[in-house]
Image (cartoon, grey):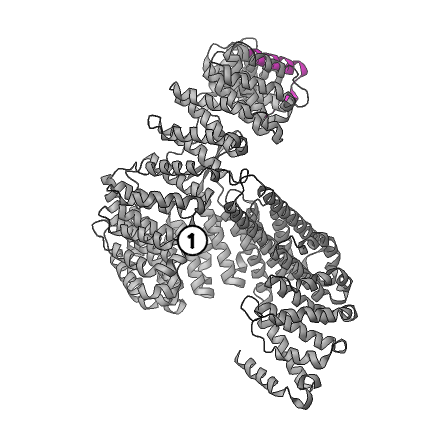
Amino acid sequence: MDSDSTQLQQAQLAAILGPDPSSFETLVSHLMSSGNEQRSQAEVLFNLCKQNHPDALSLKLVHLLESSSHVEIRAMSAILLRKQLTRDDSYIWPRLSPSTQTALKSHLLVCVQREDTKSITKKLCDTVSELASGILPDGGWPELLPFMFQCVTSDSPKLQESALLMFAQLSQYIGETLIPHLNTLHSVFFQCLSSSSNADVRIASLGASINFIQCLSSASDRDKFQDLLPSMMQTLTEALNSGQESIAQEALELLIELAGTEPKFLRRQLVDVVGSMLQIAEAESLEEGTRHLAIEFVITLAEARERAPGMMRKLPQFISRLFAILMKMLLDIEDDAAWHTADSEDEDAGESSNYSVGQECLDRLSISLGGNTIVPVASEVLPAYLAAPEWQKHHAALIALAQIAEGCSKVMTKNLEQVVIMVLNSFQDPHPRVRWAAINAVGQLSTDLGPDLQVQYHQQVLPALALAMDDFQNPRVQAHAASAVLNFSENCTPDILTPYLDGIVSKLLVLLQNGKQMVQEGALTALASVADSSQEHFQKYYDSVMPYLKAILMNATDKSNRMLRAKSMECISLVGMAVGKDKFRDDAKQVMEVLMTLQGSQMETDDPTTSYMLQAWARLCKCLGQDFLPYMSVVMPPLLQSAQLKPDVTITSADSDADIDVSDDESIETITLGDKRIGIKTSVLEEKATACNMLCCYADELKEGFYPWIDQVAPTLVPLLKFYFHEEVRKAAVSAMPELLRSAKLAIEKGQAPGRNESYIKQLSDYIIPALVEALHKEPETEICASMLDALNECVQVSGPLLDESQVRCIVDEIKQVITASSTRKRERAERAKAEDFDAEEGELLKEENEQEEEVFDQVGDCLGTLIKTFKASFLPFFDELSSYITPMWGKDKTAEERRIAICIFDDVAEQCREAALKYYDTYLPFLLEACNDENPDVRQAAVYGIGVCAEFGGTVFRPLVGEALSRLNIVIRHPNALHADNLMAYDNAVSALGKICQFHRDSIDAAQVVPAWLSCLPIKGDLIEAKLVHDQLCSMVERSDGELLGPNNQYLPKIVAVFAEVVLI
């Protein structure tokens, strides 16, 4: 910056901070300017003031807030002041002198008293609360709470409201500071809610009460506020009775928040509260928005199952009422002519906001309450709707059926016949929108009730869909029938689908030649899915289908045909994978030429071709294998570009008047976190997720052929292990980690990485494994935790010997953390099971959550097994540390899966560490022997396998236990259902263990009895690994003419010959 500019700036600053307030007021007005240049210059000057003169700036702002006659200037001053007093990068409070701090606090309170404009008062209260949240807990503003209590008990509704707004904010920010004043606050809130005649005061009191209740961690403290609930509800009722629906909506939003966070607070008065809400939902004189919020309240209570499990299921009469309300909302639909001629399959002409809310809420209600509660209600309502004369009722019944299927899948699967008849009868309905809804239901049910639906009703459903594809008068119906074929075939085995292929493929080919684009698109996705599901059975249709697909790919070049061409890529690549490389090779080259040309062309950001092309390339790679390598240089640069996309995020203040502009893009998702509203462009995230998945596919498919790309892919994917905006991105990054290591290792082993040796694998491993461990530590989703452990296990299998002790230490510490976190989650669920309203349905859901937890334990067991196999005895100091985490897993109170995993870990230690593991026998063998007769066959298998290992390596330590081991094994082998499929693996492993006792402890047994008993169990056929060992042992014994085996006068020789004859046939 030259000296003239600096001097000018200094002069401007001097004027701004000088005695004349108008210069500073002008600066603030320029900060609001719509002209970029004027605003930018003002921002530079404002930031200089903040940097070099924070005291003067703060006092100028508060003075303007206090004295400016312009409303917008006062509002802007309040906003600017709040920003400076928020504890983030802009925080200037610690830099202010004590006298400025005192003056600022004092002026702010004066402003609260004097300000008459409501919107500015709210901004002022925000500013005071923001500052107080930083300094009040440490005694930095002793005057504030007395001032607030003074305001709230004054005669001025304006001051009462201001104090209550600040109590609401402080409860959110620093609630613990207010808890000592609990009794006073209770009486203040009670007074304002029940006695104030001012609606604004009552609504502010409602907000403050609800925020304060939420910050109370003690149930007994929360209970003290129970008596406020009738007055809270009264606030809502009075607002509705006086026609103030905007205030009523504000009250409903606050009550919804309470329902989500503290549902049990409502439990004692649940009947009254829910009854009132349903009354509002039924009142047709009220605005839709008000009625929708009342429904949202009830649904939120139903969904709060972690905090109040089963509570809403205790109110069946209300659930029937709510279901009836939602069904009525589905009737709010017009037979709009635009629907019939719509070019897009997504066109929802004629559907109202009532219809959309009704649809969404039926889905949420059924997921939260489950089939045992919802299906009986639906069974009464839906047949009546289907029997009515109006098409809207038929349509509503079918839409409802599709919406509740996910939440009610278990119960609906038991009543499949009734459900299928209901839907298929409507395929003949005279109204095309009803037929469309019936097809829609089939599609949804195929997903939610599959594969049972496909197995039991393919003979009825597939012909019905084929017939619907002939409805040329109604292209919407045709296109939807093709989409439903896709849903049906996704859950279908080739043997079910194959008999129908002739009919379906020929119909889809007819639709491909249809003039309507949405019909063609539907046919393409259906063909792709049918090919994918029928695999090699699709070969006979290849020659007739592929020319049509290539024609669309090459000719659908208009902008209006972009999706059609994109779907042709999807279809071609899936058909190619189904029929295999030999059949597809010639066409593949042609298709890839077209894709390469497209890849080089400039595409618009919203062009679906990009995403479809990324997936098509990856499928072509899977189909062609190593033959695909020449195309990688074309495919990888744009793929990496997509994987490196930055999330398109917009952050605004949650209470700002400027909403994130979503009008031009439906793919923006907004979430509110604290006082920030975050908008995320989901289309960007989806493209990124697709690209990451494709990178993983290439690494998996091409193995060492992927090596040239590792140095670019690893730094792209490793940071994405902690990409919390999108689960699919994290999942793909996780899956890719072992693939990258494997690719590098194979390339080096096969001499395809010139100039590189094992140190490169070490370097890559040092980059990947610690990153994976750190990501695991921070991962919020249980399912992804399990995937991360699985990936970690595979990484250690590839590069385990290269790990140093500190890296093993990190892995072990993280495993301890995972076990602890998982146990805590299980304990919390057990607590939920003690809730007053806990019922069988909740028990089912809890069981499903715990099954996901078992997947985590499973992976922990596999990880430890790999570490033990890799490091053998040198891992034992770590095992000693872990034993306090593993031993409790043997307990009778633990699940069968936990017991099995704990046993497997000990089995691995005994097998891999041999003599070094003998010191653990005293502790673990009693558990092992007891577990041999566990009621769970998987636990038995692990235990008897362990007995075999200990018999082989335990020597004299195992000898005293041979007798007990024999009797335990005998129980497993002699069990009447020993050869039942569930028990077969345990039986085979018990036989193998018996063989090891015969081999290694012959002198401790009655060999003449035990060896023939062992022979009588042969051959074993279930566990092929054990079978090989056992039958090898038999060969060795025969070769050395084992006397006890052959028996007196070789009497067992025929049995031995019979065993060998059977083994040859296995």
Our reading of the magenta stretch's main secondary structure is: helix
Location of residue 1044 by image quarter? bottom right
In magenta segment, residue 102: yes
Farthest left residue in view: 473
740 to the left or right of 685: right
Q: Is residue 87 visible?
A: no
Q: Residues within 10 Å of mark 1 (few under 14, many from 20)?
A: many
Q: Name the residue rendered at 76%, 75% in the picture.
A: 1004
913 to the left or right of 684: right
| SS for dot 1 | helix
436 to the left or right of 301: left
Q: Is residue 1028 visible?
A: yes
Location of residue 793 by image quarter? bottom right
The picture places residue 919, in percent across and down from the top left corner, at: 78, 62
Farthest bottom residue in view: 1049
Q: Is residue 847 above or below residue 995?
A: above
The picture places residue 126, in percent across and down from the top left corner, at: 54, 21
Per the image, the residue denoted by label 1 is 614
Q: Is residue 199 above or below residue 1002?
A: above
Q: Nearer the viewer, residue 951 or 893?
A: 893
Quick one: quadrant of the N terminus? top right
806 to the left or right of 501: right
Q: Nearer the viewer, residue 735 or 843?
A: 843
The picture places residue 685, in percent across and down from the top left corner, at: 46, 44
Number of residue marks: 1
In magenta segment, residue 797: no
Amino acid carrying mark 1 in the image: Leu
The picture places residue 35, in percent across and down from the top left corner, at: 42, 23
In the image, the segment drawn in magenta is: 85-111
Q: Nearer the viewer, residue 942 or 28?
A: 942
Q: Is residue 400 above or below residue 637?
A: above
